[in-house]
Image (cartoon, rainbow, N blue to C red):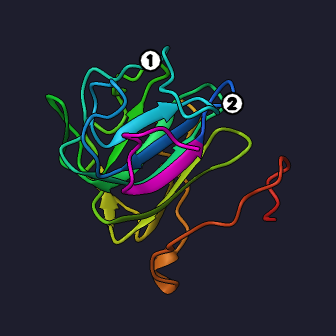
């Protein structure tokens, strides 16, 4: 049972390291944490003591996708993370700090995020370009967090995705 003060407006959830969970949404700092709209909890719903983001997004987190090494991609309705400019997409490092990916990205209207077994992140939304590249509605980031310019499906034929099917370790949709 979640403790008193547990956030109630949760919009995103992703598995974290050591049986923990990343939670995103619209909520003030809770459970003694200093960040709003983002939280990592243990399986007993206590805040993960090893994860203390020093800053928060200035808007709602709507989507989250975790990487095997503890990094987290989040998407939502925000334009900054603390003092760092981040529009719609941010990479959060294992210690809770915002990562370098996303500083030059302007990714509005993110509708879905998913990681695969290789640690790549798929992003869908109502965007047509990222960093000057035509990526209508769907793109992919490498496991190092770089935009994969060669990944260019014609998602405009399908519109934006609101969710992705989970993938098996060999990359096959379940």
Q: Main secondary structure of the magenta part?
A: loop
Is 54 positioned to the left or the right of 112 in the image? left
Whether residue 9 is in magenta: the answer is yes
Q: Residue at x 31, y 66 (%)?
A: 109
Q: Is residue 67 magenta?
A: no
Residue 50 in the image: x percent, y percent? 49, 14
Q: Is residue 145 visible?
A: no
Numbered disc 1: secondary structure: loop
Is label 1 in contact with label 2 (beta carbons under 8 Å)? Answer: no
Q: Position of residue 125 (x, y in %)?
A: 40, 68
- Which circle, 1 or 2, is nearer the viewer? 2
Residue for point 47% across, 26% down: 47
Task: Please tell me in which quadrant of the rendered image residue 5 appears.
Answer: top left
> In this rendering, does residue 43 appear at all?
yes
Q: Can you identify the residue that label 2 sits on?
A: 19
In the image, the segment drawn in magenta is: 1-14
Q: Which residue is mark 1?
A: 95
Q: Position of residue 156 (x, y in %)?
A: 45, 80
Spatial distance from mark 1 to mark 2, Cα to Cα? 16 Å
Q: Under tag 2, what secondary structure?
A: loop
The percent coordinates of residue 23 (x first, y second) are: 47, 44
Q: Is residue 56 above or below residue 134?
A: above
Which part of the image, by quadrant, shows the N terminus? top right
**Could you say which is closer to the camera, residue 87 or residue 12?**
12
Chain-order first, disc 1 or disc 2 = 2
Marker disc for residue 6? none
Viewer-side residue, 48 vs 117: 48
The C terminus - image quarter = bottom right
Q: Residues within 10 Å of mark 1 (few under 14, many from 20)?
A: few
- Could you say which quadrant of the image residue 66 lies in? top right
């Amino acid at each position: 049972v979640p403790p008193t003060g547990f956030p109630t407006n949760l919009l995103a959830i992703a598995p974290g390291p050591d049986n923990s969970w990343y939670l995103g949404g619209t909520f003030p700092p809770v459970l003694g944490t200093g960040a709003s709209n983002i939280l990592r909890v243990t399986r007993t719903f206590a805040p993960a003591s090893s994860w203390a983001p020093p800053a928060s997004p200035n808007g709602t987190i709507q989507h989250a996708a975790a990487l095997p090494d503890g990094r987290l991609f989040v998407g939502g309705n925000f334009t900054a993370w603390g003092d760092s400019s981040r529009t719609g997409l941010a990479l959060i490092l294992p210690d809770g700090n915002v990562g370098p990916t996303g500083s030059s990205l302007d990714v509005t209207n993110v509708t879905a995020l998913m990681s695969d077994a290789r640690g790549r992140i798929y992003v869908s939304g109502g965007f047509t370009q990222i960093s000057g590249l035509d990526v209508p509605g769907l793109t992919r980031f490498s496991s190092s967090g770089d935009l994969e310019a060669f990944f260019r499906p014609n998602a405009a034929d399908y519109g934006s995705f609101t969710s992705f099917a989970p993938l098996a370790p060999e990359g096959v949709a379940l």
